[in-house]
Image: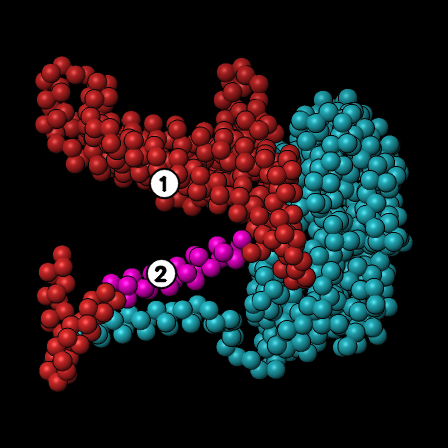
Chain colours: A red, B cyan
Amino acid sequence: MSGKVTAVTTMLGPATAAENTTRPTRYRHIQQGVRERLAPYTYVAPFFLLFFVFGLFPLLFTFYVALFEWDPIGEHHYVGLANFSQLVHDPRFWGALRNTFSIWVLSTVPQLLLALGMAHVLNHVRLRAATLFRMSVLVPYITSVAATTIVFAQLFDRDYGMLNWFLQLLGLQHVDFTASVWASNIMIAVMVAWRWTGYNTLLYLASLQAVPRELFEAAAADGANGWKQFRHVTIPALRPIIAFTVVTSTIGGLQIFTEPLLANTVGGLTCGAARQCQTLTLFLYEQAFGRFHFGYGAAVGVALFVMTVIVSAINYLLVTRIRSERP
Amino acid sequence: MKRLITTAAVFASAVLLVVGCSPGSGGNSASSGSKTFEFWSFTQINQKADVDVYTKAHPDVHIKLTEVGSTSETAQALTTALAGGKVPDLVLIQGDDLPKFMQSPENFVDLNTFGADKVKGNYLDWVLKQSTTKDGKTIGIPTDVGGMAIAYRTDLFKAAGLPTDRDEVSKLWPTWDAFLEVGKKYVQATGKAFLDNTPTSIFFQAVNQGTERYYDTDHKLSYDKNPQVKAAFDLTLKVFASGISAKQASFSSGWTAAMSKGDFAVVSAPSWLLNQIKTNAPGTAGKWDIATIPGGSGNWGGSFLAIPKRAKNPNAAWNYIAEMQSPAGELAHFLSQGSLPTTPSVYSDPQLVAKTDPFFSNAPIGKIYTQSVVGIKPFYIGPEDGTVGTELLNTLTSVEQGKVAPANAWDTALTNVKNALRG
C-alpha cells in the first residue's frame, strides 16, 4: 500500500523535481511527507465539506432550535429544556412513537419474509420468462409513492373500497380503516410493504445468483425438497444481505412520512381524527410546518435522532452476531 | 499533476461551499422593470383569470403568477420566505391562515401607506377587521368571503315526499332543531342518511353563527367558557345521536363517492364548496338546489391579498389590488368565477342578483349567499383559532367513528385542545 503511494509521489511534475535539486535533501523529504499525509484528506474533502453544510450543520442547528420557542417569522425565546419536558408529557408524542414502531414491525417483518420467498422462487432454474418476473417485482418501487398511496386509500375506503366489498362478499362487517389504531396502522404497513418488497427481493436474488448452482443440485441429489433447500442453502447464503436489508428497512421504517400524510386525510396532518396513524416524522412536520412551532418540532427531531441512534446500535450488535454465525 | 488535482479539488469544494452558503443565491427574477411583479396564489381559486383580465387592460404589466399549492401549503411557503428567502410582491392568504401572520405585522406593508384607509368603506367591516392590526394598520385587502347555505338534492327530497322548491325548503328549517326534524323525516321515508356528516356540516356552521367564538372581547382564549361554543358542540352531538348522518368526513374519498352516488341528500355549502360539488359529482348536474342555512347569517372562508415588506415592487402590486379588488373588480370576478365579493355596495347590483347556476337548478347564488353575510357581528379571530377549531372538529369526527363516547366528547375535546395549545 505504502509502496504504491511512494510510486505516485515520485512521478511529480518536472517543476517540483527542478526545485528540489536546489534544496537540501532532508527538507525535500519533509515536504514530501507532509504532502503524502495531506493528499487523502484533500481527496475526501468535497464530500465532507458538503456534508458539513447540508448534513452536520442542520443537525446541530436542530439541537440549538430545540432549546427555543421559535416562531419562524416572529420572535425566538430561549426556554432551555422546556420543549423536551413537554414532549415527555405529551400523549401525542407517545402515540406517534407507538405508531412508528408498530407500522415499522407490521411492514418490515412480512416484507422481508415475502422477499426471501420470492427471491428463492425467482432463482429457480425452471422458471420461464424469468427476466420478466424479475423486472416486474420492481414496478411498485418505481411508481410514485403519492400515486400508490392515493390508490390504496381508495381500496381501503370504509363504504366504497374494494377490500370492504370483498369482506362483505364473505359475509363480514365493513372495517373503517381510518378509525381504529390497528386497522389504520395495518393499512399504512401494507402500503410500505407493497413499495419495498420487490426492491428487497432483487437484492436477495442478486446475492442468491452468486451462490453456485451445484450447491442446490447437490442438495437436491441428497433428497432435499424445496423447503429444505430454502432453509439450509438459500438462507445461510444470504446472511450478509439479510443483515443489510434489516438495517436499511429499519432506518426507512423510522422515517415513514408520505403514506400517513396522504392515506388518511381525515384530521389534516394527523392521519386520522384521533392521530390513529400519525408517525413521528408526520408529528414533527405538523408541529414545525403546520403550526409553526419550530422549537417543539426540533425537539421531536432530536428525539427521533436519539431513537435512530439507539435502534442502529441494537441493529449493529445483532448484525455482527448474524455475520459471525457461519453456516 | 497531483498538485493540479489537489488545487482543483480544494477550489471546487470552496466554490460549492460558498455557493451553498450565500443567501438568496439564484433567486433573482429575469426582468425587474417597475411593471413586473410576482404573485403567489393557491390552487383551485383561479387567480389566473383575474391576472389575464388585468394584463389585457395593462399590456405593459407583466405578472409572474405562481400557484404554490393548497391554501396551507401557500401559507407555509410564505412563512419560509418571510423567515429568510425571496418573497413575492403580492400574496393571497386564506382567512384561517391570516391570524398567524397578523401576529407579526412588521413582515407586511401597511396598505394604508398606499391609501387603503381611503377605500376601507368599500369592504364588509367584519372582514376588514380581521386584517387590521390593533393600532390600525391594514395588512390585507379581502378578496372574497364564503357565506353559508345548504345544498340539497331535489330528486332525493322528492322521493322522500319533501318539498323541493328552495323557498319552501328554506322555510322548513328556520332553526337547527327544525333541520334535525326534517332529517328524521327523510331517514324514515327513505332509510338512507340525510346529511354528509355532523362535525363539518353542523358544528363548523353553528359555531360560526355566534357573536363570539374561541376568543372573548379582550382577545383572551375563551373556547372552554363560551356557552355558544358549547351549544354548537352539544347541537352536533344531538344531531349525531338522531342517526341522520352518513358519517363521511368532509373532503375524504368516501365523501366524494357518496356525493356522486346520492348517499346523502344535504351538505352545508359555503360558496366556495359549490365548485367542489361540481368537480366531485359532475353526474349530478341539475339535481341540486340551494336553500338558506338554519340559524341565521354566518361565514366560513375567504381570502386576503397582502404585500410582504421586502417586496421588490410593492407599487405595481398595490395598483393590481386597487383595480381588481375595487367593487367593480370583485363583481366582475364573481360573475365569471363565483367567489362572493366582500364589497357590499355591489350586493344589490342587478347582475349579481340575476346570477344563477344551472348545476344548482338555476338557484340565484348571488342573492342567497350575499344575504348570509350582511349583518354579521364581527368576532375576534386569534392566532390559535385554527388549532382550537381543528381539535374540536377532530373530536367530533372521533365521535362519528365510534371512538369517543358522546358523553365524554366535551371533556376529551378540551383535553385535546389543551395538549395542542401547549405544543
CB atoms at circles 1 and 2 under 8 Å apart? no
In this rendered view, identify the residue nearer to me: B279 or B31. B31
In this rendered view, identify the residue nearer to me: B162 or B229. B229
In this orientation, does residue B314 appear? yes
Circle 2 sits on which residue?
Answer: A48
Residue A290 against residue B239 in the figure, above or below:
below
User: Gap in Å between the C-alphas at discs 1 and 2?
Assistant: 22 Å
In this orientation, does residue B45 appear? no
Q: Secondary structure at mark 1?
A: helix
Q: Chain of mark 1?
A: A
Residue A259 magenta-highlighted: no
Residue B421: % across, % down: 71, 45
Residue drawn at x 44%, y 67% is B20
Decide if residue A305 is on the left or right side of residue B69. left
Residue A263: % across, % down: 53, 38
Residue A188 against residue B32 in the figure, above or below:
above
**10 Å neighbourhood of mark 1: few (<14), some, or many (≥20)?**
few
Circle 1 sits on which residue?
Answer: A248
Q: Amino acid at mark 2?
A: Phe
Figure quadrant of residue B8: bottom left
Residue drawn at x 79%, y 45% is B149
Q: Nearer the viewer, mark 1 or mark 2?
A: 2
Figure quadrant of residue B232: top right
In this rendered view, identify the residue nearer to me: B233 or B223. B223
Residue drawn at x 72%, y 22% is B191
Residue B41 against residue B388 in the figure, above or below:
below
Figure quadrant of residue B222: top right
In the rendered structure, which segment of residues is drawn in magenta?
A: A40-63
Q: Does the magenta stretch mainly form a helix, a strand or a loop?
A: helix
